[in-house]
Every structure is written in C-alpha cells, then in structure tokens.
Image: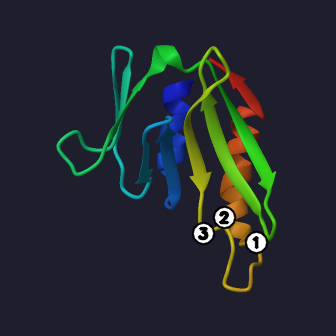
Amino acid sequence: MLFELLSDIIKIDDVLIITKNIGATCEIRSNSLSIRKKEKWITIGDNDGPAHMHVNSEMIDSAEFIQEQKPDKISFSVRFFDKSNERVIAAFFTKMYDESKNLISSRKELYDSLHQKYSSKIEF
C-alpha cells in the first residue's frame, strides 16, 4: 500500500516531497516524476535525472494525512513515519491558494479524494 499511496501522490502536480534530517533537507516536486519498486526500495524520480529519491519501504511504518493551521492558511500534507514515529518523508500539497489567499477547490478536491481513499492514518 505504501507504493500505491506514493504513486497516487506523485501523479498530482505541485506536491513538494521532502526528506529531512538534522544536517540536510531534500525537496523535489512531483511534476512528471516516475516511480518504481525493486525489492524493498522505492525510487521516486529518474535515477539518471537531476533529482531522485530512494525510499526504504521497510523503514516506513505509517502515514498520516495532516491539515495544519498556519497564520494565514491551512497546510495540507501526507507525512510518512518510521517505527519510532519520526517523520521520514512529507508530501506537501502546494499552490492550494489563489493570489487572494482563497482556497482553490479543485486542489482541495485532489487532497480530499486521496484522504478518502486511504483514510486519515495508514499502517503499513
């Protein structure tokens, strides 16, 4: 189910996929990314391209759809956690608001349809 969820996420344009640790942060946009799985490794992006990510599927224990209130808007994301409940990857849905800071309903519908398909919290 992890591969399926990641595949559905990268099909949506303008999702920012982030990996982060105390020393570095990596961000790649979902636009036109490929995805494949070989054994325990899920590769997002073209291995020969300028940016890609390798995800050890055995290290991801759960995912959660999160809507977080910010000062002037709501942030929409899917966050992936390890067994210690530490965030490993996050997929932030960007370009959710127009220039007047109004929520774009078509973008919200994309997020909501994924949320409905997978539920709020997923255990792998």
Q: Residues within 10 Å of mark 2 (few under 14, many from 20)?
A: some
Q: Check whether the beta carbons of the residues at disc 1 and disc 2 lie within 8 A of each other.
A: yes
Q: What residue did someone put label 3 on?
A: 95
Q: Nearer the viewer, residue 11 or 98?
A: 98
Query: In what element is the residue under mark 2?
Result: helix
On-image quarter of the C terminus? top right
Say which amino acid is labelled 1: Leu
The residue under the point 71% across, 34% down is 64
Q: What residue did someone put label 1 on?
A: 103
On-image quarter of the N terminus? top right
Query: In what element is the residue under mark 1?
Result: loop
Say which amino acid is labelled 3: Lys
Percent from the top left, x then y, of residue 56? 42, 21
Q: Which mark is residue 107?
A: 2
Q: CA distance from mark 1 to mark 2?
A: 8 Å
Q: Check whether the beta carbons of the residues at disc 3 and disc 2 lie within 8 A of each other.
A: yes
Q: Check whether the beta carbons of the residues at disc 1 and disc 3 lie within 8 A of each other.
A: no
Percent from the top left, x then y, of residue 96? 66, 67
Query: In what element is the residue under mark 3?
Result: loop
The residue under the point 49% across, 47% down is 17
Percent from the top left, x then y, of residue 61? 61, 18
Between circles 3 and 2, the one closer to the viewer is: 3
Q: CA distance from mark 3 to mark 2?
A: 8 Å
| 61 w.r.t. 42: above or below | above
Between circles 1 and 2, the one closer to the viewer is: 1
Between discs 3 and 2, the one toward the N terminus:
3
Determine if residue 70 is in view.
yes
The residue under the point 76% across, 72% down is 103
| 99 w.r.t. 42: above or below | below
